[in-house]
Amino acid sequence: MNIHASTIEASDDPLQLGTDPIPAAYYYDPDWFELERKAVFMRSWLNIGHVCELPEPGSFFRREIEFAGASLLVVRGKDGEIRAFHNVCTHRGTKLTSEDCGRKASFTCPYHAWTFGSDGNLLSAPDFERFYASKDELSLKQVAVDVCGGLLFICFDPQQSLPDYLGIFADRLEQVATAQATTFHEYAYEIDANWKVTYDNFQENYHLRFIHPNTSKAATSGDDPFGYPLSVTFSGRHRMQVLGDPDVNLLTPMTMVSGGRMMPNLMASGLLELPDPRDYLALFPSFFMLCNPGSNFLHTVMPISATRSRGVVRIYWKGDSDGASTLFGREYTMAVNRDVHTEDLGVIQLCQQGLSSGALEHVHLQEKEVMLRHLIEVVKEDVAAYQAEVEAGA
């Protein structure tokens, strides 16, 4: 079955991806991780931020991308265009800046004072007439960058444009609250676990009753006491599931405080109508968004090594926190999400420790863990395609 070329309604037949166990080595083997790094992460579009972080010309932020050994500058130029550059002076490779974010008209290398504009062009270099090159050929090296739904995506080696890569989910991202978000709350964490072990925890609800017995009640109902998804849909590389009983209110009294001040504006813009607030969008390889009324909860996992990864959790908001109640509500919402997530971290690392021991040859998945199986199938396809290219070019 070619995952990329088909749209699979998993709710019609949850077993159509097969029932075979998954090789455990996929979750710890360094050789397999190196194939994933080259075949998956170097070629995928990855969310690294939002346009609200670049409000005016000269605004920039820096991102360290460990799996690529890269430091990136994402900059809004004088022309309003957003570009992504390697944070590397084209003279002898020195990092241009260690600042996380800010606003600059230009970037000057701390080593030999080569200066670059916000468009990446080399503006000046001391004694440049003694070099054997032109300024035009020494602009900062660019990385592909594009925007969808206000979210910024980069790709080191794009095989497709971002709209083609996202497929049917491109339109869906344009409909959600991030498209008009103006601010966000964020926390980042590092964990001793493979990126798939980390990400998979958030693709299945099988663990809810054991790890989150008190905090998972909003995702359950009398007909679905374990919080399993109501439906799962695959589209090429990507996945979507619908969570929870639509008759159960996900907003607690405290989180309603955070949304109450924003609801009139959001309702006027129609953001509460599409998509369904129970939709959970999972974009390959390691991004998911839970669509909530008034905000969007995003979680991206990036690999650092075969057994270590970094997660970034964000909740996006529309409008400033223009009062104590709104500010409290937003802070409380993030605190609650962080508390729930903290319940997961220890058991994820225990899972990785067991897998890395080599005690298991295979991992067995039940039908409600079908999103985990789909992820593995897409990874395997990308790795196989990459290996065929290498062999053909050898």
Image (cartoon, rainbow, N blue to C red):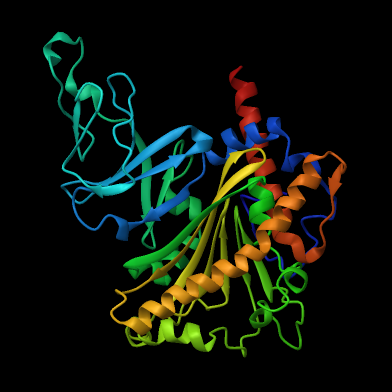
Picture residue at 27% right of the left edge, 20% below the top: 91
Name which quarter of the figure residue 74 lies in: top left
Horizontally, residue 276 falls left or right of residue 326, namely right
Can residue 2 be seen? Answer: no
In which quadrant of the rendered image does the C terminus lie? top right
**Rendered location of residue 249, percent (x, y):** 57, 88
Quick one: 281 or 161, which is closer to the camera?
Answer: 281
* Residue 215 vertical placement versus 140 (above, below): below
**Rendered location of residue 64, percent (x, y):** 43, 40
Picture residue at 81% right of the left edge, 57% below the top: 365
**Rendered location of residue 120, percent (x, y):** 23, 35
Can residue 265 be seen? Answer: yes
Quick one: 375 or 328, which is closer to the camera?
Answer: 328
Horizontally, residue 365 falls left or right of residue 392, namely right
Horizontally, residue 116 falls left or right of residue 274, namely left
* Residue 205 vertical placement versus 375 (above, below): below
Picture residue at 24% right of the left edge, 28% below the top: 109
Picture residue at 66% right of the left edge, 58% below the top: 345
* Residue 305 vertical placement versus 323 (above, below): above
